[in-house]
Amino acid sequence: MTQVDRAIAASLGWPKAKYAWVEHERRWLCRDVPLDLVRGSEDFRDLYVEGTQLRLREAVSHDGGPPMLRLGRKADVDASVRLLTSIYLSPDEFRLLSALPGRVLEKTRHSLGPIDGADVFIDVFAGPLTGLVMAEAEFTDPAAMRAWSPPLFFGPEVTQDVRFTGGRLARDGLPADFAPGS
């Protein structure tokens, strides 16, 4: 965990660097999904566990196969850098943890693969968040993240707007000033 100060990591609940990885990510609103660029899709059902930084995720690939079940923990160092840990669960473990109180967020994630050095995904939200389409790009380091230019089909960047993080969307719903197709 060389990109995050150890004291900051410890203050966020990660006293040992070997149990976390650093994610560098930016987010944008989009009008739609460029279907000609999609390499794969998954349906996500996320339970953001109340009062915690925990997320229980069920991911079902459109290509078939068993669901991927995992429990993750996230903490934001800042708007574009976060610490993560994740463990994979058996169906029985997942079922047990699914009973925890929390808010559910559902979306379909379309993977576009690498674009100019970033892994790019488009999320199409469902349920109370229907109408929200958001792109995210993940980077290997902060310099690549800062230097990257988004494709023309991306809309306004919302990385700095915490209302567009998964936990906040699950808890608060769509921002009052959000207009679908932004």
Image (spheres, helix red, strand yellow):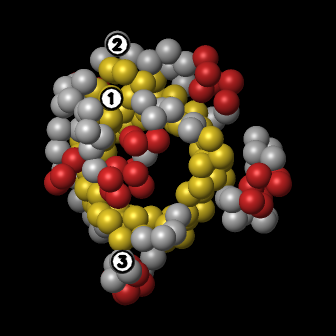
Q: Position of residue 143 (x, y in %)?
A: 68, 24
Which amino acid is tagged 3? Pro
Give the numbered dot on residue 101: 3
Report whether 55 appears left or right of 87. Answer: left
Residue 4 appears in which quarter of the rendering?
top right
Q: What is the spatial separation of the Cα atoms under label 1 and label 3, in whole angstroms?
A: 29 Å
Of labels 2 and 1, the one closer to you: 1
Q: What is the spatial separation of the Cα atoms under label 3 and label 2, in whole angstroms?
A: 40 Å
Most extreme residue toward the front, as rendered? Answer: 176
Going 39% across and 16% down the picture, which residue do you hit?
Answer: 151
Which amino acid is tagged 2? Leu
Residue 123 appears in which quarter of the rendering?
top left
Q: Position of residue 84 (x, y in %)?
A: 59, 56
* Mark 2 secondary-structure assignment: loop
Q: Callout 2 environment at 10 Å: few (<14), some (14 to 19), or many (20+)?
A: few
Going 38% across and 80% down the picture, which residue do you hit?
Answer: 100
As drawn, 31 above or below 70: above
Question: What residue is shown with label 2?
Answer: 152
The C terminus sits in image quarter: top left
